[in-house]
Amino acid sequence: MSSIALVGNPNTGKTSLFNTLTSSYEYVGNWAGVTVEKKIGSLKNGAGMLIDLPGIYSLHPLSRDESVAARYLVEESPGALINIVDASQLERNLLLTLQLLEYGKPTLLGLNMVDVASARGIQVNPEVLQTWLGVPVLPLVARTGKGSGQVLSLLKNSAAIPAVHFRLDYGEPAEQAIAAIEKMLPAGASLPDSRWVALQLMEQNPVILQILKSQLDVTPLLAICDVCQSELQSKKLALTLPQWIRSVRMDYIRSLCQAAMDTTARKPHNLTERLDALLTHRFMGLPLFIFFMYVLFKTTFDWVGGPLSDILDGWISGPISDGAGTLLQYLGASSFAHALVVDGIIGGVGGVLVFVPQIFILFLIISFLEDSGYMARVCLLMDSTMERMGLNGKAFIPFIIGFGCNVPAIMAARSIEQPKDRMLTTLLMPLMSCSARLPVYALFAAVFFPSRQAAAVLSMYVLGIVFALILCKVFSKFLFKNESSIFIIELPPYRLPQIKTLLRSTWEKGKGFLRKAGTIILAGSVIIWLMSYAGPGGLDVAMDDSFLAKFGGLIAPLLQPLGFGNWQAGSTLVPGFLAKEVIVSTMNIIYHAPDTAGLETQIAQVFTPLSSISFMVFILLYIPCLATVGVIRKETASWKWTFFSMGYSLVLAYIVSFVVFQGGRLLGWS
């Protein structure tokens, strides 16, 4: 068995099962759209490759990531399917199941979340499901791994998964149309089961229609569909052919659920409903979310993250730096090599690494909110606000991911159904404060707002969201004025995340930051240090006479109205385009700071509280990093939109920083 496809609705636990079956980890979240591309892993038992397809509700795709699944089933034809269904939402999940059974490949049905269903007083009989559907049915709890051994055992023995012969009777008009279409399909064509293809065409599946158009003239096939639909209308059975097909399936599903489910002990008010009554309350929901975010930042910068960063800073500036200097001296290294390693590499990269504890704590708490099911509720809370601005609440999911990194956040926008919403989200994503900006905020907040660090940093995150919403309204009105938006989102049950899952999720988010520290930030630190070490007069020149000072001096006059018109600030902005983390490492090198405390002292002499706010706002809003620019180009497939995203953000950063600084001066602030 060469390939096995893992298919199911969003939030049914597919990706958790994928991780368990393949011994490989893919990002697991608890919101719709977490899987935006198919992921491939080798099964533990060597039975083949497992392909984790995007979560879909139907084979009729609404979004770009849903079309991945439909196209895969047609073009790549897996050897078998594992269909994961949520036992607590069985009726809704089985619509996709029937479409997959009609596909005709050997299928295994994973009845997941039986623990959630039981907690709600719902009992599902796997034997009844197996009898009605004609496929093996295995109860699972994917997030704990319960039942995964049985899945692997069945996959090891491919004969244990028999071929599917499931067939629904859609009534005389539809059956005649199916038979007629099957006869007209070309023999030997690279298509799945002919009956399945006919049904998908009758359902107006755009992926199937596009593939058929590439192989034959579909006009006669569409004519058959039109005749069938007219006959259904004349008999007052349905208004459209897809509606009729769906109604037949739903009748079958309702009968099946009635036979397989016992809901007599169903609990009317479970934990999820009780929590939702408070956390999604019309008036209390949003203030509670803001409170949770404040606690998040307070924990990150004051209660836990700050002390840990201080300890790490002491190690880097003390034993590590001193030890490296002693070793270089013992080896007889030149003064150039000594300065490069201690001041350039350790000083530059170390100045960024001290913020690792804060970044990982931030990711840990965000992972907890995601995996608990709360983040999906935040999208629901934000929907009315975002709808007034031209987007729907589902776009808030990528925005939240953007707090970690803008690159995967832009990729997550693929799960948004409408092209307009997807494009808007992509263009506005760089306004979200990613983890790369966090060291800058933390540094300046510690210097100028030591007693209100959490509030100062949180204000930058909120400011990014506010400007994203404002520009969303502007762009919707002038760039996408004739396009509408709809909102569909899955609300998973609340769960207490597992420690192992949280740690893995946190590591997956945070390791990108460490990877940058070892590549881009390291390279940037060396280049910046060399520019500060050399000048027109040779090597080891005074900092003010270095190439870095000359370069920064060219930009400084433009920044004067913003409150930070010195060459030091100007020198940080251009390398910051490569990665925003380089800004802090550049400052460490420029100011020859032995540790974070020394850098803070230097910054306090150059900036004022007002100019520091202006600088943080500029870092928040100005041109996105190189990696983000690259993914914008990939996702939009347009240089025009890519340059637009770079241009508007730079102009916005300049205008807002100008207003902040000059407006503050008029108010008498300093």
Image: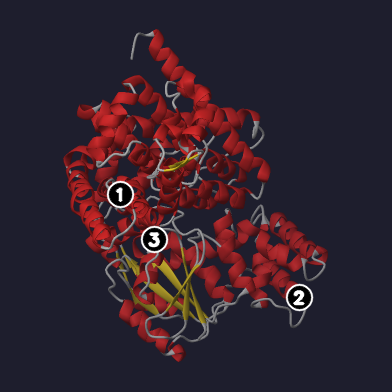
Asked if residue 89 is positioned above or below residue 355 in the image, the reply reads below
Q: Closer to us: mark 2 or mark 3?
A: 3
**Disc 1 from disc 3: Cα separation:** 28 Å
**Label 1 vs label 2: CA separation?**
65 Å
Q: Which residue is mark 3?
A: 27
Quadrant of residue 396 within the rendered picture: top left
Instruction: Give the alpha-carbon distance from disc 2 to disc 3, as whole Å.
Output: 41 Å
Which amino acid, by three-letter code, is at mark 1? Gly
The image shows residue 96, relative to residue 311, as above or below, that is below
- Badge 2, how many Cα within 10 Å: few under 14, some, many 20+? many
Q: Residue 230 in the image: x percent, y percent?
A: 74, 57
Q: Nearer the viewer, mark 1 or mark 3?
A: 1
Label 1, on which residue? 350
Residue 564 horizontal side relative to residue 349, left or right = right
What residue is shown with label 2? 185
How crowded pointer 1 is (Cα within 10 Å; few <14, some 14-19, many 20+) is rated as many
